[in-house]
Amino acid sequence: MKIALMDSGIGLLAAAAAVRGLRPDAELVLSHDPDGMPWGPRTPQDVTARALAVARAAAEHRPVALIVACNTASVHALPALRAAFEPGLPVVGTVPAIKPAAAGGGRIAVWATPATTGSPYQRGLIADFGAGADVTEVPCPGLADAVEHADDEAIDKAVAAAAALTPRDVRALVLGCTHYELVRERIAAAVAPGTLLYGSAGAVATQALRRAGLEPDPEAAPAGPPAVLASGRDAELPRAALGYPEGLLLAMVGQPG
């Protein structure tokens, strides 16, 4: 069986690696949009149109589930994607892990793109799932783009700037952009020691299997490397993806040891 993931760029790697961990035998289809990224500055209508095009390219491979591994697309395009593909193809969106982060009490922070920080969408999630916690929203200008290009200097600069805006007494930190999960160790090193980091990749992967009617089977024989689509064209994993353990994991599957 095939499981597809879509994003503007390589932010989908974290969820793809999580799916691989739960079902190594799943054939992955990674559909991204180098011609149109970044999606963050685009209008909601434009994001929806591009997301639908990327999703249609993935759907041609007949996956059993489609993961929208992008917070921006989940905010603006999820209803249109579900209208276009469900019930035949389950569509699983990505939501920042505010609920589990707030469940432990104490002060929390949410790192997100400038377009998402302070948005009605994120404020609504905090109101609905923040359990009354003291939540600090931290904009991270340039971080997603730096991660996308595996630009170490720019990553360190953006992480340091966001860490400076993060109260030192936060107990938990929510990674509100899928790209950030690829540099979670660098983020953990920049904030106060002991801060718990919450991403969405694991929960999204689990939900995709559930929607597809599949059980986890981490001992299954691994499938080959993923199929990659770049704005609808057959492609290979972007070179920048190989700068992260998740990308290397996907690239090396099925290769001789």
Image (cartoon, grey):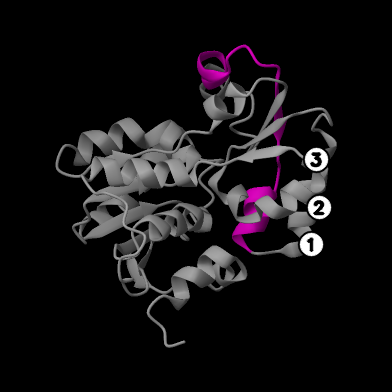
Residue 149, given in percent of the width and then of the height, sits at 63, 63
User: Where residue 153 is drawn, which disc sits there?
Assistant: 1
Query: Residue at horizontal 26%, vertical 35%?
Result: 82
Q: Is residue 55 magenta?
A: no
Residue 243, given in percent of the width and then of the height, sits at 62, 69
- Residue 232 visible from this viewpoint: no
Look at the picture and state if 196 lies above or below 156.
above
Q: Amino acid at mark 1?
A: Glu
Between tags 3 and 2, which lies in front? 3
Q: Amino acid at mark 2?
A: Lys
Q: Depth check: 38 or 111 in front? A: 111
Give the SS element for disc 2: helix
Q: As drawn, is 174 to the left or to the right of 231?
A: right
Residue 81, given in percent of the width and then of the height, sits at 29, 38
Q: CA distance from mark 1 to mark 2?
A: 6 Å
Which residue appears farthest toward the bottom when viewing the image?
A: 256
Judging by the rendered image, the residue that carries numbered circle 2 is 157
Write the start and end of the magenta stretch as one range. 125-149
Tell me which label, 3 or 2, sits earlier in the chain: 2
Judging by the rendered image, the residue that carries numbered circle 3 is 163
Q: Which quarter of the figure is the N terminus placed in?
A: bottom left
Q: As drawn, is 175 to the left or to the right of 51?
A: right
Which residue appears farthest toward the front when viewing the image?
A: 219
Residue 159, given in percent of the width and then of the height, sits at 76, 48
Q: As drawn, is 130 to the left or to the right of 69?
A: right
Give the SS element for disc 1: helix
Is label 1 in contact with label 2 (beta carbons under 8 Å)? yes
Is label 3 in contact with label 1 (beta carbons under 8 Å)? no
Q: Amino acid at mark 3?
A: Ala
Q: For label 1, count other residues whose C-alpha is less than 10 Å away and answer few (under 14), some (14-19) or many (20+).
A: few
Query: Residue at horizontal 56%, vertical 72%?
Result: 242
Q: CA distance from mark 3 to mark 1?
A: 15 Å
